[in-house]
Amino acid sequence: MAWDFSTEPEFQEQLDWVERFCREEVEPFDLVFPAAVRSKDPKIRALVQGLQQQVKDRGLWALFLDEELGGPGFGQLKLALINEILGRYPAAPGFFGTAAPDTGNMELLAMYGTPEQKERWLYPLMNQEIWSAYSMTEPQGGSDPNLFKTNAIRDGEEWVINGEKWFTSAGRYADILFVMTTSGMFVVPKDAPGVEFVEGGPRSHSHIRYNDVRVPLDHLLGPEDGAKVLAQRRLGGGRIHHAMRSIAQCKLAFDMMCERALSREAHGKVIAEHQMVQEAIADSYADINMLRLLVLWTAWTIDNSSTQQARTQIAACKYTCAKVLKDVSYRAIHIYGSLGTTDLTPLQAMWAGAPTMSVMDGVDEVHKVTVARNVLKDHRPHEGLWPTEYYPHKREAARKKFEALFAEDPELERYADGIAKYMANRNR
Ligand SMILES: Cc1cc2nc3c(=O)[nH]c(=O)nc-3n(C[C@H](O)[C@H](O)[C@H](O)COP(=O)(O)OP(=O)(O)OC[C@H]3O[C@@H](n4cnc5c(N)ncnc54)[C@H](O)[C@@H]3O)c2cc1C
C-alpha cells in the first residue's frame, strides 16, 4: 500500500536548508541587489556566484535536470516540494539554476538536442554563462498555434526565418532565442542580422521581428515540422513548475493573512475572532491544500508515467492555481484593509499575478477544454430517455435480483412492496 504523504527525513533536511537559505540569504540579497543573477557587474557576479556555490555544494543546482545532464535527477515530486519553497522568493529560482524561461529551453535541448547542440547551448545555459528566451506567441494570436505564420525556408546550407513574435519574455537579456516556426523550432543568436526588437512594446516581454534571419542547418532543434510537439513538451513541464511555485505564493498570502488577523483589533476584538475573517482563513486553508494535493499528485503521476500521460492533471493544475491565487490573495488584501491596497507588501503583486497566470502558458479556457474532452473519453451517454441514476429504474432492476427470495418468502415481498410504495409517493 504505497499511499504515503510523508517526506523522507534526509530530504526534509534538504527542504529545511532550502527554506533557511532562501529566507536568510536570498531574500535579503534580492532586496538590496535586485535582478543580481543577470548582472554583468563583476562584483555583483562574485557575490551571486558565492551564494550559488552553496546551492551547488548541497547538490541542488539545476534541480529540474536528470543526473546525466548535471542536475540532481530528483524527479517532479521532490522538485514540487522544493519549488513550493522557492516560489515564495522571486529571486530564488535564479540562485538555484531553475529560472524560467531558461528551464523550459534547457529541457528542450536535453530532450531533442544533438550532442553538439547540448555542448554549444545546454551546458552554457546551465552555468548561466548565456541566457535564452522563447519566441512562440505572435501578435495576431497566441492560444491557437494554427494562426502562427513565422516560417523558415531552407536555402542551401542555411535556414531563412521570417516572421513576427510577441511577448518573448526576457528577450532583450537573452543571448539565444528559441523560435517556433511552421518548419520547426530554431535556435537563433540574438545578434544575428535581421533580428529586430520593435520599440514601444511591453518592457519585459519583447516584440521581435525576424527579417530574413539566416541560421546554419544545425540550428534546427528536433525534427523538421516538429515545432508543435516540442512546444507542447516544453509548456507541459513549464506549467507544472509554475503551479508548484504558485502554491508558495498562496501560502505566503495565507501566512500574511493569519499574522494580520491575529495582530489587528476592530469592534472590540482581535479581527481573527470575527467569524467572517475566520471564514476567509478556513476557505483559504482548504483551497490551498486542495491545490497542493492536486499538484503533488500530478508530479507523482509524471514520475510514475510521463508528462504526456499526466496532461489532463497538468491542465487542471494550470487553471486551478490561478483561481486559488486569485481567491486567497483577494482575501488577504481584504483582511489587510487599506495597507493591502498599497504596494508596500507583496499582496498587490500577487493579486495582479492571478490574471497573468490565467493567460501565460496557455489561457485557462483552452486547458479547461482539454480537461473536459479527456475526462469525457471515460464516460458514455445513457441508453434511452433516463439517466443511469434514475431511481425508479434502479429500484425496478434491483427488485428483479430478489425475485427468487420473494417467491420463497411472500412476507419479505410484501415488506419490500410497502417500502417501494412509500418511496414512490415520497419522490413525487
Ligand atoms: C507573463 C507572460 C509571459 C509570457 N511569456 C511568453 C514567452 O516567453 N514566449 C511566448 O512565446 N509567449 C509568452 N507569453 C504569451 C502567452 O503564451 C500567450 O499570452 C497565451 O498563449 C495567450 O495568447 P494571447 O495572449 O494571444 O491571447 P489570445 O489567444 O488572443 O486569447 C485571448 C482570450 O481569448 C479567449 N480564448 C482563446 N481561446 C479560447 C478558447 N479555445 N475557448 C474560449 N476562449 C478562448 C480567452 O478569454 C483568452 O484569454 C507570455 C504571456 C504572459 C502573460
Image: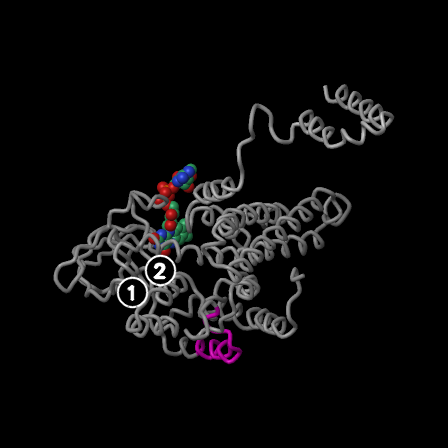
- Is residue 345 visible to us here? no
Q: Is mark 2 within 8 Å of ligand 1?
A: yes
**Structural crowding at the residue carrying mark 1, measured as other residues with C-alpha within 10 Å and reported as few (<14), some (14–19) or many (≥20):** many
The residue tagged 2 is 170
* Quadrant for the N terminus in the image: bottom right
The residue tagged 1 is 176
Q: Which residues are magenta?
A: 47-63
Q: Secondary structure at mark 1?
A: strand
Viewer-nearest residue: 367 or 424: 424
The image position of residue 317, as x and y in percent, is 52, 50
Q: Is residue 160 magenta?
A: no
Horizontal placement of 424 versus 100: left or right?
Answer: right
Q: Is residue 60 magenta?
A: yes
- Is residue 168 visible to us here? yes
The amino acid on which the numbered mark 1 sits, given as a three-letter code, is: Ile
Tell me if residue 309 comes above or below residue 384 in the rendering. below
**Structural crowding at the residue carrying mark 2, measured as other residues with C-alpha within 10 Å and reported as few (<14), some (14–19) or many (≥20):** some
The amino acid on which the numbered mark 2 sits, given as a three-letter code, is: Ala
Q: Return the disc, 2 or 1, that comes first in the chain's sequence.
A: 2
Viewer-nearest residue: 193 or 365: 365
